[in-house]
Image (cartoon, helix red, strand yellow):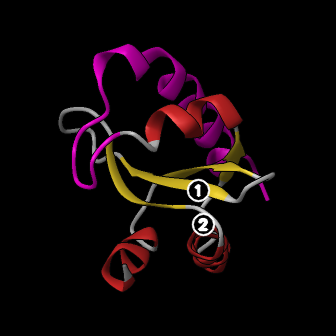
Amino acid sequence: MIGEIKEVGKATRKETKTASRLAVALQYDRKGAPRVTAKGKGAIGTKIIEVAKAHDIPIEENEVLAGALSNVELGDEIPVELYKAVAEVLVFVLRLTRAPR
């Protein structure tokens, strides 16, 4: 579990479901599809969110998408069925990270 949480610092974006603190971190290096790098609920989900915030990783709250992504094995690419939803979030993240500060 600790190894999973350390991977959050390398994530390019993260999904979270606030009610039960389900969190899923994704990394996208523009090679293939985004990969699930960390996931957890409860205390682990909260820790993933804390690490993401500490590394200034944008957080997108999407309960349905986080639930679907939580079924993907760690290290695996997201399934084709989730490409469109994840692409929309990646566009959101790109806009945030490229906005003047």
Which quadrant is the N terminus positioned in?
bottom left
Q: Which residue is mark 2?
A: 45
Lateral position of residue 53 relative to residue 90, left or right: right
| Disc 2 and disc 1 in contact, CB within 8 angstroms | yes
Q: Main secondary structure of the magenta part?
A: helix
Residue neighbourhood size for the residue with mark 1, other residues' Cα within 10 Å, grouped as few (<14), some (14–19), many (≥20): many
* Residue 71 drawn at (x, y percent): 39, 39
**59, above or below 91, in the image:** below
Lateral position of residue 10 relative to residue 73, left or right: right
Residue at 56%, 52% (x, y): give it: 14
Amino acid on which the number 1 mark rests in the picture: Ala
Highlighted magenta segment, given as a residue range? 72-101
* Residue 60 drawn at (x, y percent): 69, 44
Residue neighbourhood size for the residue with mark 2, other residues' Cα within 10 Å, grouped as few (<14), some (14–19), many (≥20): many
Mark number, residue 51: none
Residue at disc 1, secondary structure: strand
Query: Is residue 4 one of those drawn in magenta?
Result: no
Q: Which residue is mark 1?
A: 23
Of 20 and 31, which appears nearest the observer? 20
**3, above or below 33, in the image:** below
Residue at 64%, 29% (x, y): give it: 64
Considering every residue shown, the one lying at the far bottom of the view is 2
Lateral position of residue 53 relative to residue 74, left or right: right
Residue at 67%, 72% (x, y): give it: 46
Q: Earlier in the sequence, mark 2 or mark 1?
A: 1
